[in-house]
Image: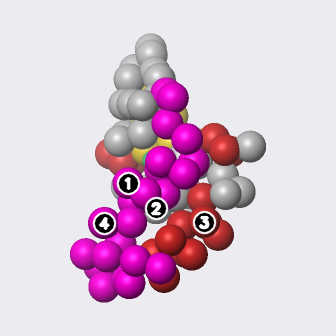
Amino acid sequence: MKICQSCGMPMNTETLYGKNADGSKNEDYCTYCYPEGSFNNPSETLQEMIESCIPFMMKEGYSESDARDYLVKNLTGLKRWQ
Ligand SMILES: [Zn+2]
């Protein structure tokens, strides 16, 4: 399964893929990160991405520190943050 190379979200259906400027699908990034040929928030840093994902993970039952550990481990290696 592909995961978004920006936020780490699993993209298990085609509708979650991002879009290139010409309307074709972008299989590297999800529709939230890369909606229309560019990043939703181009100047976002890895640290900001991690902070913005933590509340969503806490809703799924992670503690804040577990969520942060998980995100640091899983987002650091993604293409966008190289
Ligand atoms: Zn994403």
Q: Which quarter of the rendered picture does the C terminus lie within? A: top right
Percent across and percent down for residue 39 are 46, 29
Q: Secondary structure at mark 3?
A: helix
Residue at mark 1 to residue at mark 3: CA–CA distance = 12 Å
Percent across and percent down for residue 16 are 36, 48
Residue at mark 3: 72
Residue 67 magenta:
no
Amino acid type, label 4: Phe
Q: Against 45, is 25 above or below?
A: above
Q: Secondary structure at mark 1?
A: helix
Residue at mark 2: 10
Q: Which quarter of the rendered picture does the N terminus lie within? A: bottom right
Q: Secondary structure at mark 2?
A: loop
Residue at mark 4 to residue at mark 1: CA–CA distance = 8 Å
Name the N-terminal-most of marks 3 and 4.
Answer: 4
Q: Which residues are magenta?
A: 42-65
Residue at mark 2 to residue at mark 3: CA–CA distance = 16 Å
